[in-house]
Image (cartoon, rainbow, N blue to C red):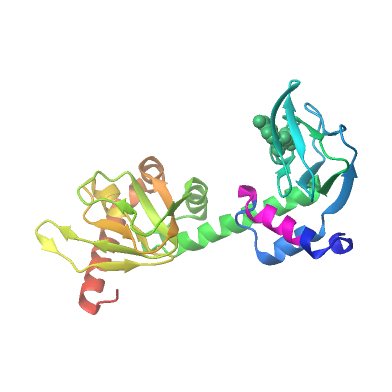
Amino acid sequence: MLFRSDASDVNMIRKALEKNLFFDQITSTELDSFIDAFEPIQVAKGLDIVTQGCLGDFFYIIGKESTVAFHMNGVQVGEAGVGGSFGELALIYSCPRAATVIAMSSPTNLFRVGRKTFRSLLQQQTKRKEAEKIDLLNGVDFLSAMSEFDLNRLARAMTLNVFQCGDVIVKKGDEGDAFYIVYEGQLHVENISVGSTKFDDIKLGRGDYFGERALATHEPRAADVIAATKGSAFRIDRKTFERVLGKFSRVIMKSQDRKIMVRNSSSVY
Ligand code: CMP
């Protein structure tokens, strides 16, 4: 529908969606077809666009030269201008509108997309995220004997941790509280020692994992893991790890020993 609008509107909608946390995993193809589904509307100054307590039907982005005001229980709680968005809460959580949104410009230019399109985009994102997590888990050698059921449980418990270059994700000597799988970016494993044996530094990238040793052995962290670039890693905490993987501790240790031996003999990293 947006073919009727000009390029600056399309750009504005693109930027508004890109900065929206709900669409952080959207692909550029999905983004293009989503942008296409928006329709431009105009609302006269002073009218309610969305009414607190009502059912949600549309998600809105605010267009040029326009402002809206948010009211809760009759009191203004905020306002937003061009590039801002509203109306996502009722669509995502299937709850009544949390606030009344009033058009403040004459007229107020908006772009809106229907509930069905909005929700199906979020569902696509969720499905893709789950598939990506399973893919990463499938690459972890000590998990190869796990049932699909357990893998899915692990995937659901994984949370994405974003890091910046120089961040210390694991500190040598600390108690281990989580296990990580690298999603994007590079990390360095430094100062590795187990007992009196020291090992070469290791570089980690997408799909590599770390932090499992301390969880499996209950020994302190055997190395520092430091971000060499910005990136992110999926994190599984000790409680989940033990609940799902408790019985795998010995397998984990064997694969950990092999990992260190392989890396030292062939300098893979
Ligand atoms: P939704 O509840 O669907 O419809 C009203 C919208 O107002 C809501 O989504 C948010 O997008 C927006 N809003 C802005 N400020 C607030 C606030 N303080 N509390 C709740 N919703 C707010």
Give the farthest residue toward the left. Answer: 196
Picture quadrant where residue 46 is located? top right
Left or right, 145 with reference to 20: left
55 and 217: which is toward the camera: 55
Left or right, 219 with reference to 37: left
Vertical order, 263 against 256 (above or below):
below
Left or right, 54 with reference to 179: right
Q: Quadrant of the N terminus?
A: bottom right
Q: How many marks?
A: 0
Vertical order, 153 against 6 (above or below):
above
Residue at 39%, 67% (x, y): give it: 205
Q: Is residue 242 visible from the viewing direction of this image? A: yes
Image spot of residue 191 (x, y percent): 19, 60
Q: Is residue 89 visible from the viewing direction of this image? A: no
* Figure quadrant, ligand 1: top right
Image spot of residue 157 (x, y percent): 48, 45
The overriding secondary structure of the stretch rendered in magenta is: helix
Q: Which residues are magenta?
A: 10-22
92 and 194: which is toward the camera: 92
Within the magenta stretch, is there residue 12? yes
Residue at 44%, 60% (x, y): give it: 231
Residue at 50%, 47% (x, y): give it: 153
Within the magenta stretch, is there residue 144? no
Image spot of residue 198 (x, y percent): 14, 64
Left or right, 196 with reference to 236: left
249 and 93: which is toward the camera: 93
Give the farthest residue toward the bottom. Answer: 266
Q: Quadrant of the C terminus?
A: bottom left
Image spot of residue 147 (x, y percent): 48, 55
